[in-house]
Amino acid sequence: MAAADTAQQQEAETARQNVPPGVNPWLIAIAVILPAFMEVIDTSIASVCLPHIAGSLSASNDEATWVLTFYLLSNAVVLPASGWFSLRFGRRRFLIASIVIFTIASFFCGAATSLLAILIARLVQGAGGGALQPLSQAILTESFPPEKRGMAMGMFGLGVVVAPILGPTLGGWLTDAYSWRWAFYINIPFGILAIILILRFVKDPPYITNANPGKLDWTGFGLLALSLGCMQVILDRGQQDDWFGAIWLRWAFGVMIVTGILFIIGQLTREKPLVDLKVFTNRNFTMGSLLIFLFGASIYGAVTLLPLFYQSMMDYSAWWAGLAVSPRGIGAIVAMPLVGMLVSRIDTRILVSLGFGGFGICSLIWGFLNLQISPWSLTIPIVLSGAAAGMVFVPLSVVALGDLPPEAIGNGSGVYNLLRNVGGSIGISVVDTILARHQQLHQNELVQHVVQGSPVYQHHLNTWTQYFSQYMSPTTAQQVAVGQVARTVGQQAMLWSYIDDLRYMGLACLLCVPIVWGLKKVRARGMPSGAH
């Protein structure tokens, strides 16, 4: 007990040393939460803009989703190296450089005149934003004494959970009121403000200033980037090029596997690896990483899917599509402070189980949607899904990282967040593939009922023929009516593909609940990094 008190006193003293004289640590919290919020919101702000981006840049909706996945890819690649860069150049300088890169790339995203241009800009933007979250978490953790750290990280968790939820609403409003380009330009003033606040209130702790990180494992970094890059290309182009029916996709898959194996071998044999894979010998970390991977796939899939449904199936504007999914933020705002208080008082596995179960049930409820719903028909499950997300992110990071030695938490946080982003990227690609494949499947099933002897088909055909006969000749009206019936069949097929997607997400989350109870019970220890 005395040893624990001594350790807590040492942590409190370290926190005081990391805060400049006369500076309230809550000002530091605002300074570092702002860039993290800005980075996380960009994972979703473009989701409601995709149809507008596709139309403006002469791309398909499938190609427009690359705007989301390319960002997540480069974001994930940078995460494992963020610790080395912060030790090599100083945490504050690296944080400011990342914000500068992110902000400049945001301008070029908004100014892009072709799909290739915006994808390159998004890659650079993701690379600049990759380190913002772990750096912000580390600074925030070290700026508060242990007794206030839970509250500070709860505030951070609130910001990064609400950000991807409010993103579609903000993006929709900017798109309708101005242009989709302002969904990216909006980062510029916030980036400048974040730089000013960090220069004024943040400083590096002594161990960062005096650190000697050695050489960066450039070989490992390159292999990781190549492996993840091939994976992303396969996910993005697979549906269009018939997956492994395309020879070049089989080659890309082979390169992904070979470079992935070489990366793992290199990390296990190097004295100072880019990623210390030995953290996976910890049961909690391994299972927690699997869970955040699956939940990242589910929540990013939902963030992409629902706004797309409202726009493509219900003909909502970008603003109304974003507004329809915005109540999720209410659930997160209500849940996060409560989670921040409970995470150190009750078994975190209870919170994580409730989060996975709640999100799964909400996804299954969404699976009952139809084309007669109002903007607010799904409000209750959307609100509850926001609360469920809050019950997963922070408690799961506590139980996954809280069992690691202190010196391994930074490395573990990078890997943990990498897997979350990779899961999100895979989730977006999977839901897009299911939409396309299942639409074809359901259309083939429905067409079998569109035959002359079907009473339902004859009823709809006669109804539409009578309607159009008011404006054109009977022969032309019947031809137009047949086209209208075909359109209805296609619309119903697409609706069922959305329903399939949502139900699969729900089942995946519910299947995660038993996995949660394979984790060991862990007491919150200073709210370790990796909350989002």
Image: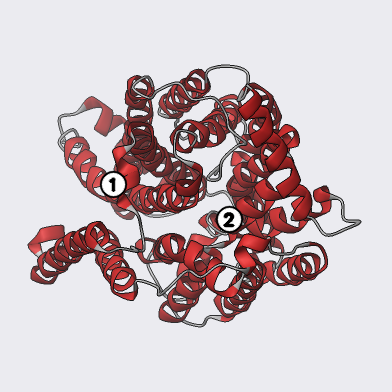
- Tell me which amino acid carries mark 2: Gln
Residue 59 versus residue 345 in the image, above or below: below
Which of the marked residues, 1 or 2, is nearer the chain's N terminus?
2
- Location of residue 289 in the rendering, given as x and y in whole percent from the top left corner: 37, 40
C-alpha distance separating marks 1 and 2: 48 Å
Furthest residue to the front? 2
Question: Looking at numbered disc 1 in the image, what kind of residue is underneath it?
Answer: Ala
Which residue bears the numbered disc 2? 133
Name the residue located 64 percent from the left edge and 68 percent from the top edge: 209
Q: Residue under label 1, please give it.
A: 486
Task: Say whether residue 438 is left or right of residue 372.
Answer: left
SS assignment at label 2: helix
Residue 234, disc? none
Q: Quadrant of the N terminus?
A: top right
Res 227 → quadrant: bottom left
Question: How packed is label 1: few (under 14 Cα within 10 Å), some, or many (20 or more)?
Answer: some
Residue at 45% x, 68% y: name it.
54
Residue at figure coordinates x 50%, y 34% from the top left: 402
Q: Where's the C terminus, which quadrant?
A: top right
Residue 399: tell me if it is visible.
Answer: yes
